[in-house]
Structures are given as C-alpha cells and as structure tokens.
Image (cartoon, rainbow, N blue to C red):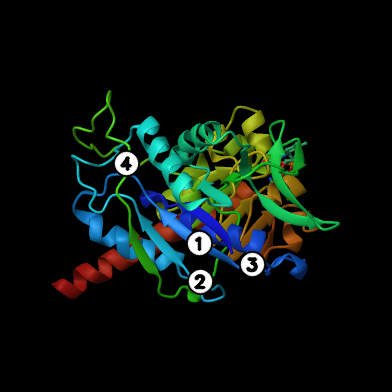
Amino acid sequence: MKKVLIYYEQKQHKNSIELLAVARLIYGGTSADEEHTEAYETYGVSLEPTGSEANGLFDFLIQICGDSAQRERRALAPCQEHDQDNSPGCDALYMTSILAELQQEYQFDCILFPATHMGRMLAPRLAMRLQTGLVADVTDIRYKDGIMEIVRPAFSGKLMAGILSRTAPLMMSVRQNVFSYDPGRLTETRLISYTPKTASSEGLRLLKVREKEASKDIRDSDILISGGGGVMRDFKKLSDLAGELDALVSASRKTVDHGIAPRSIQVGQSGKTVSPKLYLALGINGSIQHIEGLKNVEYMIAVNTNKNAPICSISDIVVEGDAKEFINKLTEKIRKEKSKEARNEFAFQK
Ligand SMILES: Cc1cc2nc3c(=O)[nH]c(=O)nc-3n(C[C@H](O)[C@H](O)[C@H](O)COP(=O)(O)OP(=O)(O)OC[C@H]3O[C@@H](n4cnc5c(N)ncnc54)[C@H](O)[C@@H]3O)c2cc1C
C-alpha cells in the first residue's frame, strides 16, 4: 500500500483539496492509464498555529483525507493541540524537522505541498533533509509509455517540461487551481495523534499572529474582468466595471508586457491559473498560452471586434464589437439599475 502525505494549509483549503486529485492521478486509477492503479492511503498534516480553531482544523483533516475510492484514509495531527505556545508557528526549520520525523516514522512514498508561500518554504527544505528530489509548481501528471511524467512550466512558461522522477519519496509542490477534486468522494477517516520528538525551536518563538490585510488575488475572485490587446488604451476603465460587479481585473500577457497591467494579474501559462464563475474577456484573442490559465470557468463572455478570434469559440456568449464601448455601456447600465433599486428601496421604507 502506497502512502501519500499532503500538507494542509489552513488558509488554502481549496488548494489542499486539489492535492487529493494529484494523489489520485499518481496512484488512483483515474488517470488515462488504468494500469497504474495502486492501492494508496492519504495522510493529511498541518503544522500552522490554529489557536481556538484547533477543533475545526482536525475536523477538516478528517474530511479532506476521506476518499471512498481508496482503502483507508488517515488524518495526522502531529501536535494534539496547537496553541500559541506549543505550535511550530512559522519557524520553517522546526516545521521541516517535524515533517522529517513523520517521514521517518511513516515512510511516505509521496509528499505533496500546495505551491503557496508556505509550501514553497517547506518543500525544498524537506527535500534537502530527505536527500530527495523535488518537482516544483506541477501542472499536470501524465503517463507516457508506462512511465509517469510530471509536468511543470520552465523558462518563464516558455516550455512545459516533462520530468521523470527517480528519487524517493516522490516530492512535489502543486500549482493552485489546476487540478480539480470532487469533494463528493469524501468519507470518514481516522485521526492519528502524533507528538513530535523534536523539541521546539531554539531560536524562534511565535509571539502573536497579526492578520495581514487581505490582499486581492485574482485566483480568489468569482468574477474576473479581463483585458487584452484590444483594450490597452482603456485598461483603467476595467476597474470601473469590476467595482460595480464586485469583481477583480485580470489581464493577458500583452498588456503586462506593455507595462499596462502588473504581472500579478496575468492569466495564462506564464501567469496565474484561475477558475472564476464568470470570465469576461475584453479584447483578448485567446492564444493557447492564455487559455492554459483558464480552468473550470463556469461562464465565459468574449467581447471582440473579430468574432472569429479563438476566444469566441470557447465562450458562452460572444459580443461582436468594441470593448471600450461595451465597458462604458455596461458600467452605466449597472449604475442606473443600482440607483433605481436604491430609490425603490427608499420609497418602500417611506
Ligand atoms: C512562452 C509563452 C508564454 C506565454 N504566456 C502567456 C500567458 O501566460 N498569458 C497570456 O495572455 N499570453 C501569454 N503568451 C502570449 C500569447 O501568445 C499572446 O501573444 C497573448 O495572449 C496575446 O494577448 P491578447 O490576446 O490580449 O492580444 P492580441 O493578440 O493583440 O489580441 C487582441 C484581440 O483583441 C481584439 N480587438 C482589437 N481591438 C478591439 C476592440 N477595440 N474591442 C474588442 N476587441 C478588440 C482583436 O480582434 C484580438 O482578438 C505567452 C507566449 C509565449 C510564447
């Protein structure tokens, strides 16, 4: 029976679930190549401070590790109760020591991290301790001639590299929003309490956790107003529309390369992978590299002067016309509707 350890990051709930999809692609038989099905069990672990939410965390570990397709699921809780005093906190070296200990104890065949700040901090340190390889920022797992190929972007996304891993345990950090997992498969599991042998960190101690003001990440938005080469001159107008729809602005690489939009909002192969409910593509042609960044988008609207642009063939609605005019009219219409609603509400209250 193969053993997979997934690192659960509390603030990246969805991404932790995505790691279960990766585990299944590696061992679980839902990959294109059924021959590679192997019995496996998943363990989940989290080492961040949870404070009063400790119980909630453990419930979550139980949940995420359940997968009815497999024999047995487990949740691993290395510290029985995380609190501010005994938590490994943000001490990456201490956290790495605990993970290395767990590896010693359980001999995992595969260890998966989300490619978040935390995952990127822990995964390479653990790989060094375990003297194993690490494939970072994985975007696909495929089988070729019976051999597993781990895919990740290389050279700023200029090519997708297929990597064969020959080291053990197999270690990866996995790009967010790329893999999807059906939570309907979650079932009950077993909670294992584990008390770390390693004494707490000598140098660092967590005194208090201060929440950083939530930064807006296009990967977290349900609605994205995305602009490309066709709206470069009017890119600022996208924010007006986004403001009215409680959405975020994203962009194609062309606008980023021209210095009109920041790289942090670029969608695509060399940018971010997004899964909004609504993607509004304004003046975007729909190159393969851009489409690569759209996964599980529920609804897509394209506004383009050329109805034969590739983005139109994958959109639910195509508006043939000028994107600037579309933004102005839609923003104005929404504002009018909102003020009409507000007036009606006021009249009703009177
Ligand atoms: C290695 C590599 C990685 C890449 N990674 C990415 C990536 O991550 N993300 C990404 O986006 N690209 C990426 N690219 C670039 C990609 O190939 C395209 O060049 C880029 O996506 C084009 O951007 P665009 O569609 O916004 O602009 P254009 O190709 O210029 O298309 C503009 C579109 O707007 C339409 N249009 C023009 N005027 C108007 C108007 N007034 N109103 C409405 N529509 C109008 C046009 O008909 C056209 O369809 C990558 C390329 C390479 C080689």
Numbered disc 2: secondary structure: loop
From this viewpoint, is residue 247 visible? yes
Asked whether the beta carbons under mark 1 and mark 4 sit within 8 Å of each other, the answer is no
Circle 3: residue type:
Gly
Asked whether the beta carbons under mark 4 and mark 2 sit within 8 Å of each other, the answer is no
Asked whether the beta carbons under mark 1 and mark 2 sit within 8 Å of each other, the answer is yes
- For mark 1, what is the residue? 42
**Does 214 sit above or below residue 73?**
above
Asked whether the beta carbons under mark 2 and mark 3 sit within 8 Å of each other, the answer is no
Circle 2: residue type:
Asp
Counting from the top left corner in percent of width and height, residue 157 is at 71, 37
Residue at image location 72% in from the left, 63% down from the top: 314
Q: Nearer the viewer, residue 28 or 332?
A: 28
**Does 97 sit above or below residue 61?**
above
- For mark 3, what is the residue? 28
Q: Nearer the viewer, residue 70 or 279?
A: 70
- For mark 4, what is the residue? 197
* Quarter of the image where one finds residue 295: bottom right
**Does 109 sit above or below residue 296?**
above
In the rendered structure, which disc, 1 or 3, sits on the residue that comes first in sequence? Answer: 3
* Mark pair 4, 2: CA separation: 30 Å
* Mark pair 1, 2: CA separation: 9 Å
* Mark pair 1, 4: CA separation: 22 Å
Circle 1: residue type:
Thr
